[in-house]
Amino acid sequence: MRIGIDLGGSKIEIIALSAAGEVQTRRRLATPAGDYAGTVEAVVGLVRAVEDELGEQCPVGLGIPGTLSPVNGLVKNANSTCLIGQPFDRDLERALGRPVRIENDANCFALSEATDGSASGLDVVFGVILGTGVGGGLAIGGRPVRGRNAIAGEWGHNPLPWPQDDERPGPGCYCGKTGCIETFLSGPAMAADLAVAAGERRTPEEIAAAAAQGEAAAVAALNRYVDRLARALASVINVVDPDAIVLGGGLSQIAPLYAEVPPRLPRYVFSDAVTTPILPPRHGDSSGVRGAAWLWPDPGGGA
């Protein structure tokens, strides 16, 4: 048995996963907003409650919206800003009295889908997060790849490849740059694109539904999004050449992406043919928390 925790900005989810990948129990509670000490306490309380229910102590894996700096071991790049600069793993280990494995939530997503998800059995898997932001994670050989600077997979803060004239210099990004992939492919970016082009404010789900009904402005907006996604993923394929790409986040539910993006990839990928599958997530919103549990591949807590 192993425990996985997904720490989000609004909720904390915990599951206990068997060696066969079966969920034994699941709990959720609201994340203490802006409260680091309260967040540590909440995570520890969830672990103890689940272990009391199971009657055994389990290895604990945790996915966070950020990563641990290899320089000082403190949290960096976290959307939950109260975590930034904190020794989160050490504080949890001290409270629980045993090792805890912490990984970026996008890496957990990729690991989940590579372990027993849509890309099960494949060696190199790139997991994409398309939601309020754009992130990514990489799993190779059934293990998450963190990288020397702990930023592997952060494709959302590369510039949009092969920009057209009307895409330059691109929208400003919170990272301080302009034209980042995130500023074109996030959910808010898709909505903003339609608003600028047609003066309409709709959610991505509404845009996709309107495009399915043949509404011209929505069709054009979805077409722009598909082409930008194809360009952005082509740059990943040119560098990593994964065995599969799995889409996650809210926009992964837009069905046309799986049919319309692959035919556009050959325009941009440096190859005579492109067979990289673009897959929906098997475990949906649960992939992150499942991947956190799989950070301990050995149910006894080994490597």
Image: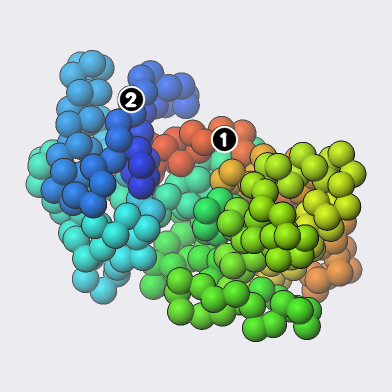
Q: Which residue is mark 1?
A: 284
Q: Pointers 2 and 1 in contact (CB under 8 A)?
A: no
Mark 2 or mark 1: name the one nearer the start of the chain: 2
Residue 78, given in percent of the width and then of the height, sits at 35, 60
Q: Position of residue 231 (x, y in %)?
A: 74, 68
Residue in view at x 47 percent, y 52 percent:
107
Q: Residue at x 25, y 17 (%)?
A: 54
Which element is circle 2 on? strand
Q: Residue 191 lies in what quarter of the image?
A: bottom right
Indicate which disc residue 33 carries. Answer: none
User: Is there any visible trace of residue 296 in the rendered image?
Assistant: no
Residue closest to the eye, 140 or 42: 42
| Label 2 – label 1 distance at C-alpha | 17 Å
Q: Which residue is mark 2?
A: 27
Q: Position of residue 44 (x, y in %)?
A: 18, 36
The residue located at (35%, 38%) in the rendering is 11
When the figure is inspected, residue 56 is found, relative to residue 239, above or below; the finding is above
Q: How is the image coloured?
A: rainbow
Q: Residues within 10 Å of mark 1 (few under 14, many from 20)?
A: some
Which residue is pictured at 26% across the width and 63% down the height?
Answer: 84
Check disc 1 and give the amino acid type: Gly
Q: On the rendered image, what quadrant is the C terminus found in?
A: top left
Furthest toward the front, the residue is: 199
Residue 52 at x, y percent in the picture: 18, 19
